[in-house]
Amino acid sequence: MKLRLLDILVCPDNKEWPLKIHIFEKRKIEKPFLPKEDGNTKVVCSFYCPKKQLKLTEGSDKDEIIVSKDASKIKYEIDCRECISSEIVAGLIECPSCKVFYPVIDEIPIILKKELRNEDIEREFTEKWADKIKEIKV
Ligand SMILES: [Zn+2]
Ligand SMILES: [Zn+2]
């Protein structure tokens, strides 16, 4: 998944947004599709910029994330370019409110409710990235 997806991804359980990402492995997309730069804001992300961890719309301020409507803090060339050219190969997406983790396996985010999740696939993932996962959960 592209880092950019965090812009719109919500938790399937409680619709929490934005979600956090812990990246274990990523690759750079050499020729990303670059939408036309917005002359006013120079922002590609619409609601939340995962690179800057900045909300671009007004939201509740209960989060630790900086709430800002000031998109001018984001520089397209250095920030959002990374949002659209970073492919997350493996990682964990965390819902900060439910404390539930969703894996990104082989570039695919598994954003499913508990009852739909596949334990076998996830066990393999958890074993492969055990060290990284330990770092997060302590
Ligand atoms: Zn961005
Ligand atoms: Zn949640």
Image (cartoon, rainbow, N blue to C red):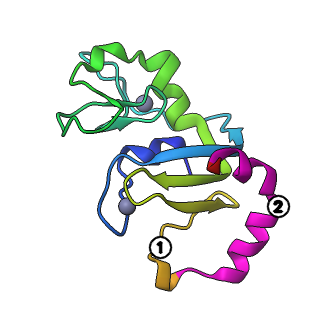
Which residue is under mark 1? 112
Badge count: 2
In this view, 9 is above or below 36: below
Determine the image quadrant of residue 108: bottom right
* First to last magenta residue range: 117-136
Out of 70 and 120, give the one closest to the viewer: 120
Element class at badge 2: helix
Q: Residues within 10 Å of mark 1 (few under 14, many from 20)?
A: some
Q: Residue at x 70, y 61 (%)?
A: 106
Earlier sequence position, callout 1 versus callout 2: 1
Residue 22 percent location from the top left of the image: 60, 44
Name above or below for residue 126 compared with residue 86.
below
In this view, which residue lies farthest toward the bottom? 115
**Residue type (three-letter) at the residue carrying disc 2:** Lys
Q: Position of residue 129 (x, y in %)?
A: 78, 56
Compared with residue 88, is residue 121 higher up or lower down, i.e. above or below? below
Instruction: Look at the image and say whether residue 123 sits in the magenta stretch.
Output: yes
Residue shown at 73% from the left, 51% from the top: 134
Type of secondary structure dominating the magenta stretch: helix
On the image, the x and y values in percent for residue 138 come to: 65, 47
- Which quarter holds ligand 1? top left
Q: Does the residue tagged 1 have its C-beta within 8 Å of any atom of ligand 2?
A: no
Is residue 44 toward the left or the right of residue 121 in the image?
A: left
Q: Is the CB of the residue bearing disc 2 within 8 angstroms of ligand 2?
A: no
Residue at point 38% right, 43% down?
Answer: 7
- Mark 1 element type: loop
Vertical comparison of 82 with 78: above or below: below
Q: Label 2: how many residues lie within 10 Å, few (<14), some (14-19) or many (20+)?
A: few
Work out how far the residue at label 1 is from the one at label 2, CA to CA, in angstroms.
20 Å
Residue topped by disc 2: 128
Question: Residue at (30%, 64%) from the top-left corner?
Answer: 14
